[in-house]
C-alpha cells in the first residue's frame, strides 16, 4: 500500500551504483529513512527530485521500523529564492542541522511545523537572521532550557526590567542589575515578541540593525552556555555573517 507523506529531504546517502537512501523530515513519521532505487541513473525521472532540501509529497511503500521504498514525488515548493543564494543556503543548512538535533532530543512533531514555516518565510524574502533567531528561541523549550520572559530571572520582579542577559538566563531588573551589558530597550521587547510570535503570521519585519545584532548576540551566547549544541553549520554561518 502506497502512503503519501509530506516532508523535506534532510540527508542523502549513496547506496550502490544507482540507488541512494534519503532521510525525510516529516510531521507524521518524524525522520523517515527511504530507499530510492535507481534514482542516480541519468534516465531516472526522480534523479532531481530526491536531492537534499527537496520539499514535497513523497509516495512510499511505508515500512514501520524499516527503510520505506520510494515510488514517486510531487514538489510542493522548490524554494528557488534560497537555492539561488549561497548565503541563504547557509541559513537553510544550519536550520536543518539544528532542527534535526533538537528533534532527536525530544521527538516533538510540532518542530516540523516551525521548521517548514521558517524556511518558507526566508524563501519569501524576510530577513533570514531574524527568522533564524525566532526559530532558535522557539526551540529552547524543546531542549529543556526555555527562557523566563515574564519577570526578572533573579528576583521575579515584573517591573523595572533594564536588560536581558544570557549568563543570567533572562531579564534583569533595576534592583538586581550589577554589571550586565545594557541592551537597547527595544531589544528587551523584541526578544519576547520573537519567543511568542506565530511564524506564519509574519508579513514584514521592521527592526533596526542594532536590535537585530543584539538579539543575535544574546541567542548565540545563550546557546553556547545552556544547550550543549555546537554545530559546524552554525560556525560556518557565523563566519559568513562576519564577511
Image: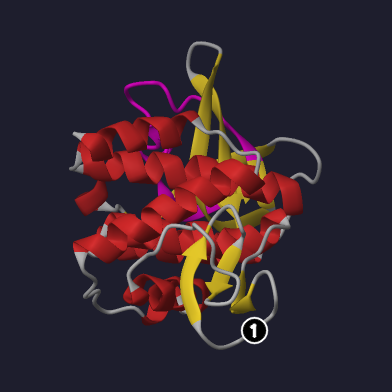
Residues drawn in magenta: 33-58
Q: Position of residue 1 (x, y in %)?
A: 70, 54
Point 60% across, 71% down: residue: 176
- Residue 76 appears in the rendering: no
Depicted 199 relative to depicted 93: above or below: below
Label 1 belongs to which residue? 157
Residue sitting at 44 percent across and 72 percent down? 194
Q: Is residue 156 left or right of residue 21?
A: right
Give the image quarter of residue 15: top right
Quadrant in the rendering for residue 233: top left
Closer-to-camera residue (223/99): 223
* SS state under label 1: loop
Residue 228 visible somewhere in the drawing: yes
**Place of residue 20 in the rendered image (x, y in percent of width and height, measured from the top left):** 53, 24
Residue 120's place in the image compared with 17, above or below, is below
Q: Which quarter of the figure is the C terminus placed in?
A: top left
Decide whether residue 49 is among the magenta residues.
yes
Amino acid at each position: 500500500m502506497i502512503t503519501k507523506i509530506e516532508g523535506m529531504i534532510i540527508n542523502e546517502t549513496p547506496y550502490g551504483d544507482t540507488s541512494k537512501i534519503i532521510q525525510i523530515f516529516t510531521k507524521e513519521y518524524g525522520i523517515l529513512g527511504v530507499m530510492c532505487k535507481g534514482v542516480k541513473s541519468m534516465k531516472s525521472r526522480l534523479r532531481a527530485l530526491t536531492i537534499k532540501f527537496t520539499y514535497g509529497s513523497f509516495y512510499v511503500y511505508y515500512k514501520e521500523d524499516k527503510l520505506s521504498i520510494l515510488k514517486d514525488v510531487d514538489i510542493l515548493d522548490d524554494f528557488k529564492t534560497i537555492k539561488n543564494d549561497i548565503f541563504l543556503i547557509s541559513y537553510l543548512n544550519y536550520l536543518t542541522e539544528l532542527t534535526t538535533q533538537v528533534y532527536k532530543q525530544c521527538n516533538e512533531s510540532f518542530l516540523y511545523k516551525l521548521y517548514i514555516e521558517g524556511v518558507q518565510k526566508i524563501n519569501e524574502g524576510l530577513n533570514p537572521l531574524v527568522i533564524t533567531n525566532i526559530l532558535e528561541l522557539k526551540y529552547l523549550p524543546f531542549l529543556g532550557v526555555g527562557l523566563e520572559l515574564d519577570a526578572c530571572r533573579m528576583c521575579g520582579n515584573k517591573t523595572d526590567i533594564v536588560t536581558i542577559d544570557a549568563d543570567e538566563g533572562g531579564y534583569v531588573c533595576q534592583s538586581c542589575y550589577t554589571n550586565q551589558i545594557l541592551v537597547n530597550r527595544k531589544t528587551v521587547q523584541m526578544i519576547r515578541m520573537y519567543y511568542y510570535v506565530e511564524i506564519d503570521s509574519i508579513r514584514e519585519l521592521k527592526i533596526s540593525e542594532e536590535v537585530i545584532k543584539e538579539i543575535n548576540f544574546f541567542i548565540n551566547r545563550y546557546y553556547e552556555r545552556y544547550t550543549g549544541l555546537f554545530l559546524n553549520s552554525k560556525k560556518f554561518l557565523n563566519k559568513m555573517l562576519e564577511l
